[in-house]
Image (cartoon, grey):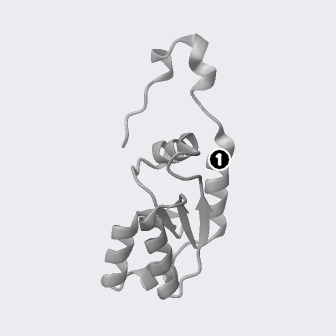
């Protein structure tokens, strides 16, 4: 999938820093495990708002996790991006799987696949 720097290629003095703060990722993982639909986003992002509005219009209950705005909590958002490999927000999870962002959600709705995904979800 995504290449990750091998620990033996990092100097021993910094190896303890490589894992980062896992509490944030644990929070996201737990939310994904407990809720059928999770939207991870940030303040002031119109695409995140559009995603949530689309889910509301489809009457899909969802949990929203918000991590800062454009200038705050960028490290937290970077950790999430590195974990998922998805470069933008929102990041939308359905049934425990990352389905992508707003454009991907719109495509699922247009194709009539959103309800089927929700019905088949493992949550």
**For this rendering, which residue is in front, 121 or 50?**
50
**For this rendering, which residue is in front, 116 or 43?**
43
Residue at 48% x, 70% y is 49
| Residue 103 seen | yes
| Residue 32 seen | no
Instruction: Indicate the quadrant where residue 72 lies.
Output: top right
Residue at 65% x, 62% y is 31
Give x and y (percent) for residue 74: 53, 43
| Element type at mark 1 | helix
Left or right: where 87 falls relative to 21: left
Residue at 45% x, 72% y is 51
Residue at 66% x, 49% y is 26
Instruction: Indicate the quadrant where residue 37 lies.
Output: bottom right
Is 22 situated above or below 93? Answer: above
Instruction: Indicate the quadrant where residue 21 lies.
Output: top right
Q: In the rendered picture of this protein, how many numbered marks are placed on residues?
A: 1
Give x and y (percent) for residue 1: 36, 43
Left or right: where 120 falls relative to 68: left
Few, some or many residues within 10 Å of mark 1 (<14, 14–19, 20+):
some
Left or right: where 79 falls relative to 88: right
Give x and y (percent) for residue 2: 37, 40
Residue bearing mark 1: 24
Give x and y (percent) for residue 66: 60, 59
């Amino acid at each position: 999938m995504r290449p990750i720097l091998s620990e033996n290629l990092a100097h021993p003095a910094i190896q303890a820093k490589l894992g980062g703060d896992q509490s944030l990722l644990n929070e996201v993982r737990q939310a994904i495990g407990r809720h059928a639909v999770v939207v991870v986003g940030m303040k002031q992002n119109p695409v995140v708002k559009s995603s949530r509005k689309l889910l509301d219009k489809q009457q899909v209950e969802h949990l929203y996790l918000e991590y800062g705005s454009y200038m705050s909590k960028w490290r937290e958002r970077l950790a999430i991006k590195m974990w998922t490999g998805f470069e933008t927000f929102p990041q939308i999870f359905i049934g425990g799987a990352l389905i992508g962002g707003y454009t991907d959600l719109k495509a699922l709705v247009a194709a009539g696949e959103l309800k089927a995904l929700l019905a088949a979800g493992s949550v």
